Image: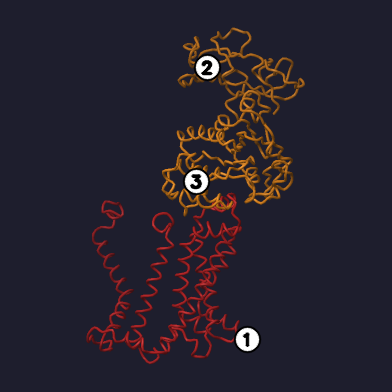
Chain colours: A red, B orange
Amino acid sequence: MTDASPLARLQGRGTRRLLRAHALVIYLFLYGPIVTLIVLSFNAGGMPTAWTGFSFKWYGALIQNPEILKSVANSLLVALAVTLISTAGGTLLALGLERGRPSTLLDSFVMVPMIIPDIVLAIALLSFYTLLQFTLGLYTIVLSQSVFVIAFAAAVVRTRLRNFDRSVIEASIDLGAGAWTTFRRVTLPIILPGVIAAALLSFTLSIDDFVIAYFSAGAGSGSTTFPMKIYAMIRFGVTPEINAIATLLLLVSFTLMLLAQRFSREPGRGAGA
Amino acid sequence: MTGLIQIAAVEKSFGPVVALAGIDLEIRENEFFALLGPSGCGKTTLLRILAGFETPDRGRIALDGSDLVAMPANRRPINMMFQSYALFPHMTVEGNVAYGLEMEGVRGAELKRRAAEALAMVQLEDVARRKPHLLSGGQRQRVALARALVKRPRLLLLDEPLAALDKKLRDQMRLELKRLQHETGITFLIVTHDQEEALVMADRIALMNQGRIAQLGSPRALYEEPANRFVADFIGLMNLIEGKAAPGGLAAEGLGRVLPAAEGGLPAGTPASLAIRPERIRVRPATPTASGEGLAGRVESVAYLGQDLILHVRVAGLKRPLVARLGAGQESLPEMTEGATVACEWTKERARLLTN
């Protein structure tokens, strides 16, 4: 909006200044705590009240803690499995939904796992496992997370499919290709950016998830994931170590989300390859 | 010319909508055939049935005498050029053209050579390595054409191939398509709603209406000898005067006289329309009182088109004004002004009686 626009003229100089100040306060409110956390993770003294110098020592302490490393390994394992299941499942689901007759009912059913409160889903899954007499462990975490991550993955792939000219599939068949060849050489390459975006999002959602993992993990400490470990540690107060962990988690999530956004961008320039 | 495709009693419905209500048609070897008709007439459905994307509810289709319906789309020796072109966006122009050959198992040097040949045929060698989104609309259209022709199909289907191009390019591509058909000797079947396109390019035209073939014939036959009112109205400009068949012509409603027309075997009294082309009407100056052969009327409007003059002549008793097209070389032209009284006449053989 330029200064000459009617709306800007209507607002006047004072209003604009006030809006700008308001925006600044909101941003401080949103990002202040996060910046504090990152800064404290490099605080040598370890006290949240006093800065005593820059240090990587808390990151070093993390790496030497076998329990934390074990939880990271668990989280990575779970996230990889969830990513594989959800990306494949979500992609097929998206293809099926876009191909079939448009149905609001089916669409809503796919959305439900996304909007249902985590805690409700977690309890439901736990009761379900108890009913089927499953032994809880890492694999139940994978199953539980896949339930809601698939919905997100499908949604991401569907945005890509919406601009998909279905006649390219017919063209491929017309030129002599079978169904599988058409999928491998035409459909998949065209929707690949969406599939990659879905995979990145799936990974992030899984790494990040606490509530559902916590309910599905069972009693043993063998299936403790990274967020669950942080939760356990935090009972004894927020240590600088936890700040360091959180900073790392933030870094991973941030990078993946940025990548995912890059890939889910509209086809055409840049990401269209 | 021998028959390539025989279509017999083909019907197709989508739910309550009847797309094809019984089509019988033969498409001959090496001809340029047009399916023409208004949108919703079933022409695209018939095309998609031939391509193998739809299955007819009833009826038989044979290619070279053997059943085509049972053959899956990817095994038919038929290729299609899509209206949207449907180019593979992630492949280069060369990749697009080579795709169909790869599916046949063509590899290596021969693959390259044949793809290059196809691109040369449509003058696109220079852009072989580009992706489709970097091409102009006309170039994309040619890639689609090369991709469909490279497999040397028995039948090439073209779905509104020129619809997305601007006027100038469209005229140019008409000739180009005609040339390619001639050079390759492949049978072309084009679907279009543009009558001019069909008239200019096709050897034979099937004009479709509401799931049936209204008339099948050469462009000249459709223009000069329309079989019914729908054809007469759809192709070109036509004056249609309602009435009943009578000895010597048509007893026109509201005129109380018989207008000359070739009777065409219609029994007297049958409701019919007299069809006469604007360029077949002779117009001469007349006085209001003069009676005689012609239909007297008043010039309502004059449109000057360069080599032609279009007159709308209001005749008392007729619902619509007569449209006449006069060559600009005619001597009496200066007298054809708005409001002038004129007489319109035509040779009996030039007017046809059509059932409604």
Q: Nearer the viewer, mark 3 or mark 2?
A: 3
Q: Amino acid at mark 1?
A: Gln
Per the image, the residue denoted by label 2 is B326
- Where is residue B249 shown, x and y percent of the image? 70, 17
Position of residue B32 in the picture relative to residue B258 (left or right):
left
Q: Residues within 10 Å of mark 3 (few under 14, many from 20)?
A: few
Q: Nearer the viewer, mark 1 or mark 2?
A: 1
Asked whether B35 or B268 is in front, the reply is: B35
* Residue B346 circle label: none
Q: Is residue B192 above or below residue A1?
A: above
Q: CA distance from mark 3 to mark 2?
A: 55 Å
Circle 2 sits in a helix, a strand or a loop, which is it? Answer: strand
Instruction: Give the CA distance from mark 1 to mark 2.
Output: 93 Å
Q: What chain does mark 3 sit on?
A: B
- Label 2 CA crowd tier, 10 Å (few <14, some 14–19, many 20+): many
**Host chain of mark 2:** B
Depth order, front residue of A16/A73: A73
Q: Amino acid at mark 2?
A: Leu
In this rendering, the answer to whether B322 lies above or below A155 is: above
For mark 3, what is the residue? B113
Q: Residue at x 31, y 71 (%)?
A: A27
- Chain at tag 1: A
Disc 1 vs disc 2: Cβ atoms closer than 8 Å? no
User: Where residue A173 appears, x then y in whole percent?
Assistant: 59, 52
Task: Report the disc number at residue A133.
Answer: 1
> Image height check: is A158 above or below A143?
above
Residue type, mark 3 in image: Arg
| SS label for mark 3 | helix
Residue B253, horizontal then vertical, whole percent = 68, 21
